[in-house]
C-alpha cells in the first residue's frame, strides 16, 4: 500500500469503529471482565518461543481485539512487514532497506538488497568477530607490550552503546568474569575518566563503535582514549593497531582515524543504529560472553522474527503488543508506557528501549510528508520493578494518569547466583505478581472499610485499579531469551509505526541539536560571536564564560 495514497488513519472506517467502541465500553472494569469470563486469565495469553505473554489484564474485550486487528489490516501492517523482510527500501526518507532481521538469518537464507544476497556478508563478519573474540578471550591477542588483554572498553553512543551495554548487563552471568568490560558514551570527560582511571593501558582494548564514524562524542572520546593509551604506554602510533578496533560502515573514516581497516568489523547502511547490537556493534558483548552464546542470542532474535513474519494476526505477539499500545495512546490518551523488569540484570533494558521506541516513533510527520493528526510514539520509561515500587509506583496506582505497563519476570534466578541468595527469588516474583494484581483489581472502599480503617482514611486507602499491564514470563534469562525479547519490542515498534504511517527508521529529529552545538562551541571556548543567537542562549553563554573565568 502506497504511503501517499492511503486514507488518512483517522478517516478510516476502522478508526471510527474503534472510537465508537471506546465510547461504548466507557469505563469498563477489569473486575467485571474477569467476573464475566472466568477463563480470561488463561484465554488471553500467547506463547512465543520461551516467552509466555499474559494480556488478560488489559481494558479490552474480544471485540476490541478484532477491531484493532481490522485497523492493522486496513493500514496494511503485514504488507509493510513483508516488504521489510524482502529488503525493500521502506526507510523512504533515507532510501534504505531495513534489514536488521538479516543479521540473525541462518547461513543458508537468501535476502537481497539491490539484487545482492546480503546473508554471506553477515556471516563473514560474524565469523571474523568470532575468531577475534576467541583470540582475545584465550589471551592469544596481546597488546603492544605483549601483555594479555584484560579490559575491553567500548566507545560509542546511542545505538552504538545502549545495545551492547544493556546486553552485557543482562548476560553478566554468562560473561568471562576475568574480563573487565566497560562502556563509554558521554562526551563529558568524566565518563572516559571513570572507565579508564584504574586500568593498565597495556592490557586494554578499545572498541570504537560508530556506524557513521563521524559522531562527535565518539570521535572525541576515541581520540582522548588514544592519547591516554599512547601516553600510558609511552608509545607512538604503531601501538594503536593492537589496542584499537572499529565497528563501522565507514572504512574511509576508520582509516583516517588511524585504525587499520583489517581491524574493522563491518556492517551496512540497511542496519539502523538502534537496531544494530546484533551486528558487529555487538563485538564487546561477544568478547564477554563468547561466540556460542552470541549465536544463541541471534537464534532467539530469529525465532521471534519468524513468528512475526508468519504467525496469523490472532496469535502474532508483536502485532498484539503494538495494537494494545495504539489502543491506549490513541483511544485512551495515554502518554507514556512503562517497562518494568523484575530482574536486576535488566537494569538497562528500558533505557535501551527508549532509543528503540522513541527514536523510531517520536515523529509528527507521516510517510506522506504531511503532519499526522494523531498521537504517535509514547514516552517509554521504567526501571527494575522492585526499586520502582518504592519510588514512582504510587503515581501508577493512585495518580491521575493512565500508564500501561509491561512486567517482565523469570521463573528461575540466574544459574550462578550465590546459593544463599536463591531463596530471595520467590520474594522478588511475589512482588512481580502482586503488583499487576493490585494494579488491575485495586481495592474497593468496602474492602478497605472491612479492614476497620477509619472512614476519613477510606478514600486514601482505596485503589481504583483498572491499570492495564502485560505480563511477560519466561523460565530463565538466557542469551536466546534476551534475543527473543528484543526482537519482540523491535517488531512491536514496527507495527505501531506502520499503523501511524510514519518512517520508524530515520531520526532527523536529532540533527538540529548537533548542528547548533557545533555553532555554539566556539562561543564558549573563544568568545566567538554566533550570528542570530537568541537572547536567552546569548545570556547563558555569557554567564558560562563568566563562571569559567573567561
Ligand atoms: O544521534 C542519533 C544517532 O544517529 C543514533 O541514531 C545512533 O545510534 C547514534 O547517533 C550513534 O551514531 P553512530 O553509530 O553513527 O556513531
Image: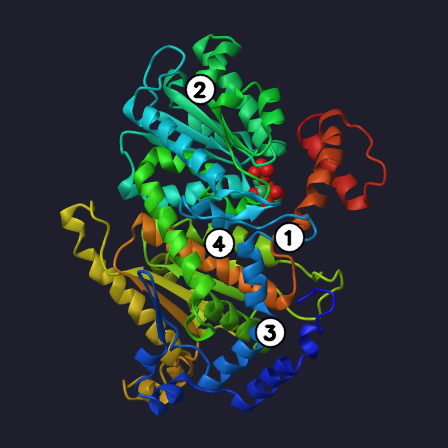
Point out the tag, 2 or 4, that comes first from the N-terminus: 2
Foreground disc of the pair 1, 3: 1
Tag of residue 243? 2
Q: Residue 120: horizontal and vertical position, in percent?
A: 47, 39
Give the distance between the C-alpha atoms of the residues marked 4 and 1, in whole angstroms. 20 Å
Q: Residue 170: horizontal and vertical position, in percent?
A: 35, 47
Asked if disc 2 and disc 3 are in contact, CB closer than 8 Å, the reply is no
Give the distance between the C-alpha atoms of the residues marked 2 and 1, in whole angstroms. 36 Å
The kind of secondary structure element at disc 3 is helix
Q: Residue furthest left?
A: 419
Horizontal side of 442 relative to 425 (left or right) equals right
Point out the tag, 4 or 1, that comes first from the N-terminus: 1
Point out the tag, 1 or 3, that comes first from the N-terminus: 1
State the residue at coordinates (53%, 55%).
85
State the residue at coordinates (38%, 22%).
199
Give the distance between the C-alpha atoms of the residues marked 4 and 3, in whole angstroms. 20 Å
Foreground disc of the pair 4, 1: 1
Horizontal side of 480 relative to 532 (left or right) equals left
Pointer 1: what residue? 91
Tag of residue 330? 3
The kind of secondary structure element at disc 2 is helix
Amino acid at each position: 500500500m502506497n504511503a501517499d495514497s492511503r486514507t488518512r488513519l483517522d478517516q478510516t472506517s476502522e478508526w471510527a469503529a474503534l472510537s465508537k467502541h471506546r465510547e461504548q465500553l466507557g469505563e469498563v472494569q477489569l473486575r467485571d471482565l474477569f467476573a464475566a469470563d472466568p477463563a480470561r486469565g488463561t484465554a488471553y495469553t500467547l506463547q512465543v518461543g520461551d516467552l509466555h505473554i499474559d494480556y488478560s489484564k488489559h481494558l479490552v474485550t474480544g471485540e476490541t481485539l478484532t477491531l484493532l486487528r481490522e485497523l492493522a489490516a486496513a493500514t496494511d501492517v503485514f504488507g509493510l512487514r513483508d516488504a521489510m523482510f524482502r529488503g525493500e527500501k521502506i526507510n523512504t526518507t533515507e532510501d534504505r532497506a531495513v534489514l536488521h532481521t538479516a543479521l540473525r538469518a541462518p547461513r543458508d537464507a537468501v535476502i537481497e538488497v539491490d539484487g545482492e544476497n546480503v546473508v554471506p556478508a553477515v556471516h563473514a563478519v560474524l565469523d571474523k568477530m568470532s575468531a577475534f573474540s576467541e583470540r582475545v578471550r584465550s589471551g592469544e591477542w596481546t597488546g603492544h607490550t605483549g601483555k594479555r588483554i584484560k579490559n575491553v572498553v567500548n566507545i560509542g553512543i546511542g545505538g552504538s552503546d545502549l545495545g551492547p551495554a544493556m546486553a552485557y548487563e543482562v548476560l553478566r552471568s554468562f560473561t568471562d568474569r576475568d574480563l573487565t568490560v566497560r562502556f563509554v558514551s558521554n562526551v563529558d570527560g568524566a565518563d572516559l575518566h571513570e572507565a579508564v582511571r584504574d586500568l593498565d593501558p597495556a592490557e586494554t582494548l578499545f572498541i570504537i563503535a560508530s556506524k557513521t564514524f563521524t559522531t562527535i562524542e565518539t570521535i572525541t572520546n576515541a581520540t582522548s582514549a588514544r592519547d591516554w593509551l599512547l601516553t600510558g604506554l609511552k608509545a607512538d602510533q604503531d601501538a594503536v593497531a593492537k589496542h584499537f578496533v572499529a565497528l563501522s560502515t565507514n572504512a574511509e573514516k576508520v582509516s583516517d582515524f588511524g585504525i587499520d581497516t583489517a581491524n574493522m568489523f563491518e556492517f551496512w547502511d540497511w542496519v539502523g543504529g538502534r537496531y544494530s547490537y546484533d551486528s558487529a556493534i555487538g563485538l564487546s558483548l561477544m568478547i564477554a560472553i563468547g561466540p556460542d552464546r552470541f549465536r544463541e542470542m541471534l537464534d532467539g532474535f530469529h525465532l521471534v522474527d519468524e513468528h512475526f513474519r508468519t504467525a496469523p494476526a490472532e496469535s502474532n505477539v508483536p502485532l498484539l503488543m503494538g495494537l494494545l499500545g495504539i489502543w491506549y495512546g490513541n483511544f485512551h490518551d495515554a502518554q507514556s508506557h512503562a517497562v518494568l523488569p523484575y530482574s536486576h540484570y535488566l537494569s538497562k533494558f528500558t533505557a535501551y528501549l527508549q532509543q528503540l521506541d522513541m527514536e523510531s516513533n517520536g515523529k509528527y510527520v507521516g510517510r506522506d510528508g504531511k503532519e499526522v493528526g494523531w498521537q504517535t510514539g509514547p514516552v517509554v520509561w521504567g526501571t527494575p520493578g522492585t526499586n520502582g515500587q518504592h519510588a514512582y509506583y504510587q503515581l501508577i496506582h493512585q495518580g491521575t494518569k493512565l500508564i500501561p505497563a509491561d512486567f517482565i519476570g523469570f521463573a528461575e534466578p540466574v544459574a550462578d547466583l550465590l546459593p544463599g541468595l536463591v531463596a530471595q527469588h520467590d520474594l522478588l516474583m511475589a512482588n512481580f505478581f502482586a503488583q499487576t494484581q493490585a494494579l488491575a483489581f485495586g481495592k474497593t472502599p468496602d474492602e478497605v472499610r472491612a479492614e476497620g480503617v477509619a472512614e476519613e482514611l477510606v478514600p486514601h486507602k482505596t485503589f481504583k485499579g483498572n491499570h492495564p499491564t502485560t505480563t511477560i514470563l519466561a523460565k530463565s534469562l538466557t542469551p536466546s531469551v534476551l534475543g527473543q525479547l528484543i526482537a519482540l519490542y523491535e517488531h512491536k515498534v514496527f507495527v505501531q509505526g506502520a499503523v501511524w504511517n510514519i518512517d520508524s527508521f530515520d531520526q532527523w529529529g536529532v540533527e538540529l541539536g548537533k548542528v547548533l552545538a557545533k555553532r555554539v562551541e566556539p562561543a564558549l571556548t573563544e568568545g566567538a560571536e554566533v550570528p542570530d543567537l537568541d537572547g536567552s542562549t546569548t545570556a547563558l553563554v555569557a554567564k558560562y564564560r563568566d563562571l569559567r573565568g573567561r
